[in-house]
Amino acid sequence: MIIEVILGVLTGVLLGLIPSLHINFVSYLFISFSIFLIFPNYLFFFLSLSISQLITNYIPQTFFSVPNTENIMSLFPLHRLFLKQQAYDGIFLCFIGSFFGSLFSILLLPLLFLLFTFFIGFNFLISFAIIFTIISFIFSYKSIKDKLIIFFIIFSSGLLGLFTLKYNYFVKEPLFICVMGLFTFPLLLKSIFEKKHNNIYQKTNHSFLPSLENSYFYSFFGSLASLFVILVPSFSSSLGAVIFSRFKEKISTYNYLIIFSSISISALIFSYFLAMFFNKPRLGYFAILLSEKLVLLKSDLVLFISAILLTVSLTIFILLSIVKDIILFFNSKNLNKLNIIVLIISFIFIIFLSDFKTLIVFFLSFLIGFVPLVFNKSRVYLMGYIMLPTLLFYL
Amino acid sequence: MDEKKLNLFLILTIIISLLIFLFCTLFFKAPILDLLSPDSSLLEQVVLVSGNLKDFSLENNNLFFKICNLSSCIDVVYFNPSKTNVDLLQNAFSFKKEIKITGKYTLYQNKPEIILYKFED
């Protein structure tokens, strides 16, 4: 079992460094080629692979702005720090949030069990939270023109979300395709053509170090927020992070990263727990695993917890020892050329998962994704893609 | 909180998790299910069962067989077994070898069965 965990960590680190490679795609490949069957305890292999891939993914996310669908909200503060030559700080903060977030999420498992067992439902609160978030987005600007632009961005991305997520008219893997179109490709293209951003030399020493108390506090906060996010169907960790960002505007970029990374890792751990105990998948690739009957027994809870601890610690330990070398590597390269390579690799993944209709959807999401860049507005408003379908789900 | 402190936390956590693994491997023993008089209080738990194999079949990459002790049998299902494991079980079936299986004792359509987790001969 330890061998499966260690191999999962190493595989996850390798795959996590590839920009735009999504865990859903990996799980499809592994199941298609029966790669899991090599291992007697293949669920532990996949558990450690998915966790280590999530954590490692912060590195390409920082340099190429390629988001993981589970931690889209980390993209914005990471990119901000990248522009301030603080990529190393950003990645380090994500590691802190992931590590302490995983510890707190394990401590919160009994509470999750109780809440899920006796959960009556506060779904109606979610509708109010989403409406509040949308209104606060629009009215955070004073001029009518800005309000209209924000409204357009939220509404158009929301419509796209409705047709691809809720009604699923066009595509089989809508989330990945649209996230790439909305968030990744416009920024990559912008980066390629705006060469001033590509020669930003990243420091490999700290400009900022969080205190131990802040690390605990914000990680715990993230795990707690994730606990409530995971209890509500169709409510993703990214959407939870968006709503949270409207309630707590005075938190610094650095602490945001701790919270968002903690939310992401906690959501993943809670999802595995719910799949194991209640047969309720919350993430796409769990549905794939459960359909293949790759489930843990309840008596494996202790092993499950120790596998998580080992995976998170080993992953971050390995990454801490190589991240400075990775940054130095990127510093020595023309990021413009690397961005072009990432663009091509991402497009290949999209072609692999797409047919003609999906490409139209991708092109449409790409056009919508460009609007915030053209009008110099935050890309967080593109989260309307998830907000509107979720709102309609609860209304 | 710098790299040194974080590394200290990480190393400590790695050691604790490895100790937990070791503890579970050395000290956890699943209760034995007696096929002649199965204990219903062991339902939904991991159990150990010894016996010989009967009615061996592979369908849609899932293995179905019965494990028997004298005249009492219980259904066993093994989801997505590797080729090696199928061959080992086939071998045990063909040569009527007694094997020990670990799995979840559960009910499927009100009939007791074991979802096989691991086995040894």
Image (spheres, grey):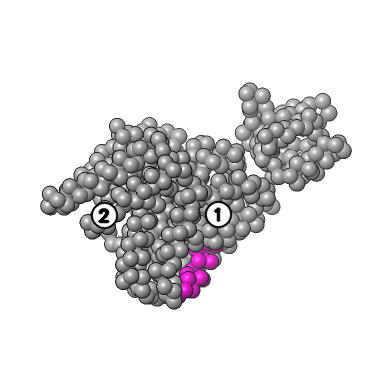
Instruction: Give the residue type at disc 2.
Output: Pro
In this view of the protein, can residue B4 be seen by the observer?
A: no
Instruction: Tell me whether circle 1 and circle 2 mark residues in contact (CB < 8 Å).
Output: no
Which label sits on residue A372?
Answer: 2
Q: Quadrant of residue A331?
A: bottom left
Q: Is residue B42 above or below residue A20?
A: above
Residue appearing at x 57%, y 48% in the figure: A29
As for residue A318 lying within the magenta part, the answer is: yes
Of A96 and A138, the residue lying toward us: A138
Q: Which badge, 1 or 2, comes first in the chain's sequence?
A: 1
Neighbor class of circle 2 (other Cα within 10 Å; few <14, some 14-19, many 20+) is many
Looking at the magenta stretch, what is its main secondary structure? helix
Separation of marks 1 and 2 at Cα, in angstroms: 34 Å
Magenta residue check for A198: no
Mark 1 nearby-residue class (10 Å; few <14, some 14–19, many ≥20): many
In this rendering, the answer to whether A290 lies above or below A75 is: above
Element under disc 1 = helix
Disc 1: which residue: A49
Placement of the C terminus of chain A among the 4 image quadrants = top left
* Element type at mark 2: helix
Q: Which residues are magenta?
A: A310-329
At x 55%, y 47%, the residue is: A27
Q: Is residue A30 left or right of residue A312?
A: right
Tell me residue A157's x, y (percent): 30, 45
Residue under the point 71% across and 45% down:
B82
> What is the chain identity of the residue bearing mark 1?
A
The chain holding disc 2 is A
* Rendered location of residue A228, percent (x, y): 37, 43
Quarter of the image where one finds residue A207: bottom left
